[in-house]
Amino acid sequence: MVVLPLAGLLQRAPWSSLATDLRAHEALAALRLSLETSLGALALSVVFGVPLAWVLARRRFPGRSLVRALVTLPMVLPPVVGGIALLYAFGRRGFAGRILYDLTGWRLVFNTTGAIVAEAFVAMPFLIVTAEAAFRSMDRSAEEAAATLGARPAYRFRRVTLPAVAPALAAGAALTWARALGEFGATITFAGNTAGKTQTAPLLVYLDIESGHDATALALSLVLLGVSLAVLVGLRDRWVGNP
């Protein structure tokens, strides 16, 4: 179930022309855009996800379980449904998108920024889950010692808490980036599939397969497979421990 599809991909891969296929203009543009949007999505996830994870781990408030369920919902929500939800929220006629456009003239839909938002929407829960678990399980004695010495909350968070959970945050960030890099459904629904603007590598793979350009699609698929495999192998010990 797992090995045979990967074997089929490797068997059909155009190994002799792989470098040439990856140097094609549309492939390079899609890979470059994928890198830019996935890093942008990672930045958004860190800015919004880490503080939210800390609140969920350290603060009790009414509806916390509901908030936790809502922020992790994109992990199980069909990506196309997520794209539709983003469209009706941040689209030109969406309730938030209309206000944003009237105030600033910015449009999030069908542009590169929209691709970043779509990828962050789908990938951010992976960082939140990892960061919340780290904040919840860390030894808080160092924080308490810093508090007794007069350290302010912001200073304690920056100099004590973050260094203590940094390895877990790095693992969550890597997983979040890999998920954003491979995002397809929400991106094509909310941002579209415009070459050089919103056409990331997964979207180009789909377009090339549909149009019969299998060589480029397979070459890009191998790149995405290699990145995903590298991230998972690198994070394995953190998830299951050393054998």
Image (cartoon, rainbow, N blue to C red):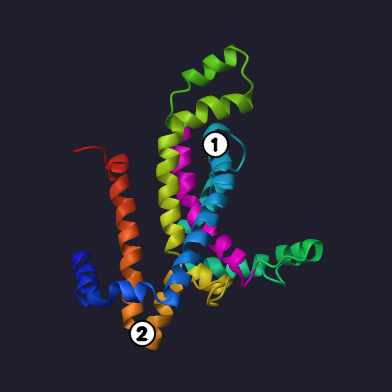
User: Could you tell me which secondary element the residue under label 1 belongs to?
Assistant: helix
Predominant secondary structure in magenta? Answer: helix
* x and y percentages locating residue 141 in the rendered image: 47, 18
Q: Residue under label 1, please give it.
A: 54
Q: Which residues are magenta?
A: 109-135
Furthest residue toward top: 149
User: Could you tell me which secondary element the residue under label 2 belongs to?
Assistant: loop
Closer mark to the observer between disc 1 and disc 2: 2
Q: Is residue 125 magenta?
A: yes
Residue drawn at 44 percent across, 38 percent down: 133
Judge the density around disc 1: few (<14), some (14-19), many (≥20) Cα neighbours within 10 Å.
some
The answer to which image quadrant residue 50 occupies is top right
- Give the left or right position of residue 86, taking residue 19 as reference: right
Marks counted in the figure total 2
Quadrant where the N terminus lies?
Answer: bottom left
Seen from the viewer's position, the closer of residues 140 and 188 is: 188
Q: Is residue 46 above or below residue 143?
A: below
Q: Residue under label 2, please give it.
A: 213
- What's under tag 2, amino acid-wise? His
* x and y percentages locating residue 166 in the rendered image: 45, 35
The answer to which image quadrant residue 182 occupies is bottom left
Earlier in the chain: of badge 1 and badge 2, it is: 1
Residue drawn at 41 percent across, 49 percent down: 174
Quadrant where the C terminus lies?
Answer: top left
* x and y percentages locating residue 10 in the rendered image: 22, 71
Find the distance from the CA under tag 1 to the CA under tag 2.
Answer: 46 Å
* x and y percentages locating residue 20 in the rendered image: 33, 75
Q: Is residue 76 visible?
A: no
Q: Is residue 206 above or below residue 46?
A: below
Residue drawn at 59 percent across, 12 percent down: 149
Q: Is residue 132 above or below residue 151?
A: below
